[in-house]
Image: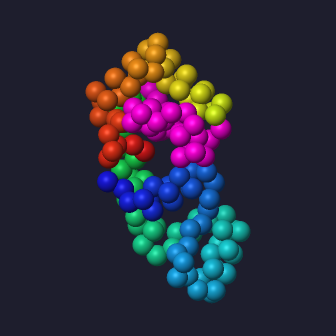
Amino acid sequence: MRSRRSCSVLRALRAGVRGYLLKSSGPAAIARALAAVAEGDVVLSGPVGAIVARAALRTSAPGPFPQLSARETEILDHVARGSGNAQIVRELFLSVKTVQNHVSAVLGKLGVATCAEAVARARDAGLGSAGSGQ
């Protein structure tokens, strides 16, 4: 199971963040990180890089629904956990319309008519539990 820090860092990276420094980073490390990010690099301070790399490797394995994108699978997992659109919007930093579009795409790709049917299929495939997700 992922730590809270790796989950929040992964969400931030998906949202466009290109650097993460620990509070203990000194001025020189901050200056180097700023320069590296300005050059297009991604900077992950201390053990965060290793934690995020392990989490990313776990999420790169093929999921139970290969027809879904990683984001669609992530949203389906949230829906299967009982999250409503507003909660998904807050947690994934997406717009309401984007979440609605993803949910519609999931329903179509799974060939189901309702969210309840999608949730049932997701739970049968192991999504929707506390340790699941992207």
Task: Give whichever of 55, 126 is nearer the camera.
Answer: 126
Residue drawn at (54%, 78%) of the image: 23
Q: x, y (%) of residue 112? A: 43, 14
- Residue 55 vertical position relative to residue 134 in the rendered view, above or below: below
107 left or right of 121 in image: right
Decide whether residue 81 is among the magenta residues: yes
Residue 84 in sight in this render? yes
Decide whether residue 12 is among the magenta residues: no
In which quadrant of the rendered view does residue 2 lie? bottom left
State the quadrant of the C terminus: top left
- Residue 50 vertical position relative to residue 83 in the rendered view, above or below: below
Residue 109 in sight in this render? no
Residue range (magenta): 67-95
Q: How is the image coloured?
A: rainbow
Residue drawn at (52%, 69%) of the image: 44
Q: x, y (%) of residue 58? A: 36, 50
- Residue 27 vertical position relative to residue 89 in the rendered view, above or below: below
In which quadrant of the rendered view does residue 40 lie? bottom right
- Magenta: predominant secondary structure element? helix
Residue drawn at (34%, 35%) of the image: 127
Q: x, y (%) of residue 107? A: 48, 20
State the quadrant of the N terminus: bottom left
Residue drawn at (67%, 74%) of the image: 34
